[in-house]
Image (spheres, helix red, strand yellow):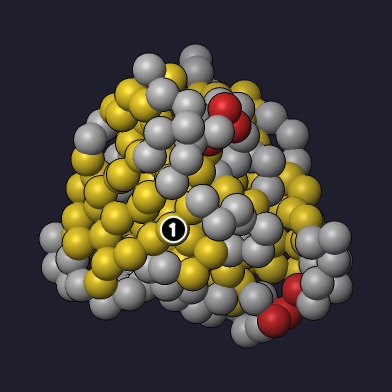
Amino acid sequence: EIVMTQSPATLSVSPGERATLSCRASQSVSSNLAWYQQKPGQAPRLLIYDASTRATGIPARFSGSGSGTEFTLTISSLQSEDFAVYYCQQYNNWPVTFGQGTKVEIK
Amino acid sequence: QVQLVQSGAEVKKPGAAVKVSCKASGYTFSTYGISWVRQAPGQGPEWMGWISAYNGNTNYAQKLQGRLTMTTDTSTSTAYMELRSLRSDDTAVYYCARNSFLRPMDVWGKGTTVTVSS
């Protein structure tokens, strides 16, 4: 099973600032990586897939990069609605696996 | 619009079984699969398995093999997840999500809370 490790666990950011979240895979997942956003009481929402492609309706301030084992989600200028938990997920191999999440909180 | 509507919350005793439904609308059901993902309180998502709505092929998480069955009914565009021999650590919110074989989950249901308690 591929283990996904996210860092940091919590990121404190001021509105308008840039946030950079990291995700590492225990073995290569090529570009088969997605990022999801989850707010309290809601289902996860797909933000990025194939490591760098924004899902339908996702604002351009969200961008993804990386391949192989190292991936990054960048939020260029945090808006109030972006404070949430973010998960990475690999879908290169069964079983698909999620990271434990990075909580982006207001500084 | 594309949506997945899940059945309501369940409370079960240890050892019982639960069956959760997920009704799809707004797209051709058989052209995608359905994943089931659960999330225990305060934890990250855990993938449980995937079923093809085209041919019923399944892929289950190894830790749930033997207790988990996923099915689909194409006549009603509904997917089902049954988990048996429930334990307290099965308490979680259970989500269905649309995706193709080894692809991202692009549409999610709102979740079904399953509580296992004596």
How many discs mark residues in the rendered view? Answer: 1
Taking the image as shown, residue B72 lies to the left or right of residue A17, namely: right
The disc numbered 1 marks a residue on which chain?
Answer: A
Q: Position of residue A72 (x, y in %)?
A: 29, 55
Q: At x 56% / y 76%, what residue is drawn?
A: B100
Q: Is residue A16 above or below residue A57?
A: above
Q: At x 31% / y 44%, what residue is drawn?
A: A20
Q: Position of residue A39 (x, y in %)?
A: 55, 32
Depth order, front residue of B35/A103: A103
Taking the image as shown, residue B107 lies to the left or right of residue B37, namely: right
Dividing the picture into quadrants, the one containing residue A58 is bottom right
Taking the image as shown, residue B87 lies to the left or right of residue A46, namely: left
Disc 1 marks a residue whose amino acid type is Ser
User: Disc 1 marks which residue?
Assistant: A63
Q: Secondary structure at mark 1?
A: strand
Q: Position of residue B44 (x, y in %)?
A: 38, 38
Q: Is residue A7 above or below residue A2?
A: above
Depth order, front residue of B28/A16: A16
Q: Position of residue A44 (x, y in %)?
A: 55, 44
How many neighbours does mark 1 have within 10 angstroms: few (below 14), some (14-19), or many (20 or more)?
A: many
Taking the image as shown, residue B25 lies to the left or right of residue B87, namely: right
Depth order, front residue of A96/B86: A96
Dividing the picture into quadrants, the one containing residue A105 is top left
Q: At x 25% / y 72%, what residue is drawn?
A: A67
Depth order, front residue of B40/A44: A44
Residue lying at the far left in this picture: please name it. A26
Q: At x 38% / y 67%, what residue is drawn?
A: A51
Name the image quarter holding the N terminus of chain B.
bottom right
The answer to whether residue B118 is visible is yes
